[in-house]
Amino acid sequence: AQKVTQAQTEISVVEKEDVTLDCVYETRDTTYYLFWYKQPPSGELVFLIRRNSFDEQNEISGRYSWNFQKSTSSFNFTITASQVVDSAVYFCALRSNQGGKLIFGQGTELSVKP
Amino acid sequence: ETGVTQTPRHLVMGMTNKKSLKCEQHLGHNAMYWYKQSAKKPLELMFVYSLEERVENNSVPSRFSPECPNSSHLFLHLHTLQPEDSALYLCASSRTFGGGSFYEQYFGPGTRLTVT
């Protein structure tokens, strides 16, 4: 069975703080794909990143960085110097290479206060 | 800005009404999806269409009826809904649905549905 767990339901930080959103996944597949999506108050899910299971390089995009650790089945997301506009619900998701649907975590609601 | 649009953005309907939600994608994708997002609950996949054929139906009540007339359009027909069906309904599309390839799903802005 496949499962994605985002243990942090809500996180509140003050602007300019760094924040890490945790994602732990379960799968028996050897090849799979991991995703992060952002859902601002407007409702639309915005794709942030895709990571393949065979590529464990960490990635940085501006203030965003992702740490993929296959040994611990984690795919954590860090926002550096958070801003109010980062306030949103963030979803981690998993997809098998066998095809099929995305398995979403429950989401982490991030609130960045000025 | 994504290439997936949804109309209407907000809908209030009574339990005896019939209404339809519309989704259109301008990305040339072959797979389209309906999700339901209730308050404080994870995203629930409702239906998947690949090349205009339904490939997944996750035990959704028959009061929800999807239609995919072509690869760019997806509808969700609603009738005799219940108050617990009030939720955000999200449409998404992706290049493919099958295995052997990776893809991202691109989402529309959603329709906020309230059933009174």
Image (cartoon, rainbow, N blue to C red):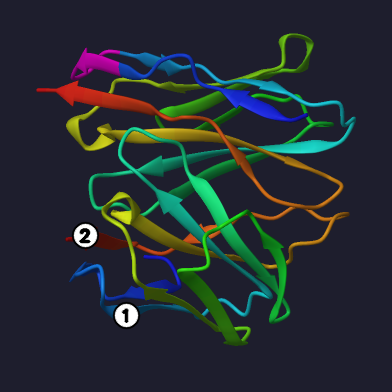
Q: Position of residue A50 (x, y in %)?
A: 64, 42
Instruction: Name the amino acid type tagged 1.
Output: Lys
Q: Position of residue B30 (x, y in %)?
A: 69, 75
**On screen, A49 above or below B94?**
above
Residue at figure coordinates x 36%, y 15% from the top left: A19
Residue at figure coordinates x 72%, y 25% from the top left: A57
Q: Is residue A81 magenta?
A: no
Residue at figure coordinates x 59%, y 37% from the top left: A93
Q: Quadrant of the C terminus of chain B?
A: bottom left
Instruction: Name the amino acid type tagged 2.
Output: Thr
The mark nearer the N terminus, 1 or 2, is 1
* Residue where numbered disc 1 is placed: B19
Q: Is residue B74 left or right of residue A79?
A: right
Mark 2 surroundings: few (<14), some (14-19) or many (≥20) residues within 10 A = some
Residue at figure coordinates x 64%, y 74% from the top left: B29
* Residue where numbered disc 2 is placed: B114
